[in-house]
Every structure is written in C-alpha cells, then in structure tokens.
Image: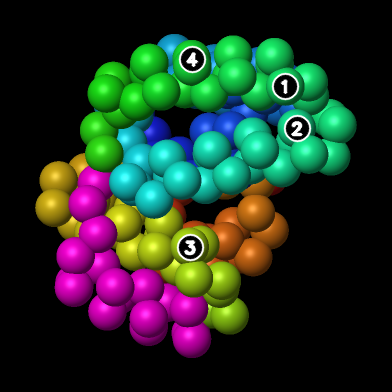
Amino acid sequence: MILYLDASALVKRYIAENSSEQVNGWIDAADMVVTCIITRVEVAAATACAQRMKIISSDEAAAALRLFRSEWESFQRLPINENTVMRGDFLACEYNLRGFDATHLACALIWQETLSLPVTLATFDGQLVQAAKEVKMEILPSD
C-alpha cells in the first residue's frame, strides 16, 4: 500500500489520540509512506496547540517533536509547485476545502497519477474524506 498521510492522520503518530494505534498500524503496513512538505509545519503547529490547550505537557510536546523530526526523512515528502497549487485551487472551490486540505488532496492525486498506482489517503478531516470519495481515492479510515 502507498499511504499518503495528511496532518490530521500523521499527528496521531506523535500525540496519543483516538486512532493513534490504527495510524501506526497503517504506517507499519505501508510499502511507502508519503506526505506533503507542508505537513511538517502542520504537525508542529498541532503539537504546539495541544501543549497550549494543556492536552500534553511541554515535555511531551518536546518529545513528540523530537520523534517527528527524527522520522521526517523516512517519509516520501512531496514538494509544492505551481501545478500543485493550481490543482489545489480547483479542488478547494469544487469541494469546499480549506487551503491545506486542498493542497493535500492535490498532492495525493498528483502522486497517484505520477505512479499510475493507487494511493490511499489517510485523513480524519470529514470534508477532505468527502472530497477524496468524490475523486475516487482510496481512504483510511474506511467507512
């Protein structure tokens, strides 16, 4: 399985949440784990937010970020270019997506088209799930 993780999925690897074990299982089972370079900022921001909201301690946040940053190179990281932005522009308008969600979907679709192989999109964002279904992507968690 080629697994594309958006930030809502990847953050569960580093901060214990509902479905964290499930996400770790998907990562372990994947032949390739892919994300977009913007995910690095999103995971850092989500970790800082969890600390601010006192969901995790400052020590837990620091440990989560250390682990995330140490594993970052192990992921296939997709760049953002003009083609990605243009595709994301269309997807945002067509499916009422937020900017980063549209960018993640654009990256996953472009990667799938580049490889000519199915890419499974892991996300816990409801609007992104709906859009991914509309464009016929495989999705985790499945219904």
Residue type marked 3: Phe
Under mark 2, the amino acid is Gln
Q: Say which residue appears at 51% left-offset and 62% top-offset.
A: 101
What is the distance, in whole Å, between disc 1 and disc 2 at their CAs?
A: 6 Å
Question: Does 14 sit above or below residue 111?
Answer: above
Could you tell me which residue is drawn at 57 percent across and 61 percent down? 128
Residue range (magenta): 78-94
Single out the mark in the foreground, 4 or 2: 2
Residue 118 in the image: x percent, y percent?
A: 30, 44
Q: Earlier in the sequence, mark 3 or mark 4?
A: 4
Of the image marks 2 and 3, the number of the one nearer the N terminus: 2
Q: Position of residue 130 (x, y in %)?
A: 60, 64
Q: Which quadrant of the structure image shows residue 105?
A: bottom left
Q: Does dot 3 land on a helix, a strand or a loop?
A: helix
Q: Give the residue at mark 4.
A: 67
Q: Which residue is mark 1?
A: 58
Q: Position of residue 76 (x, y in %)?
A: 25, 33
Q: Earlier in the sequence, mark 1 or mark 4?
A: 1
Give the distance between the C-alpha atoms of the residues marked 4 and 2, in whole angstroms.
16 Å
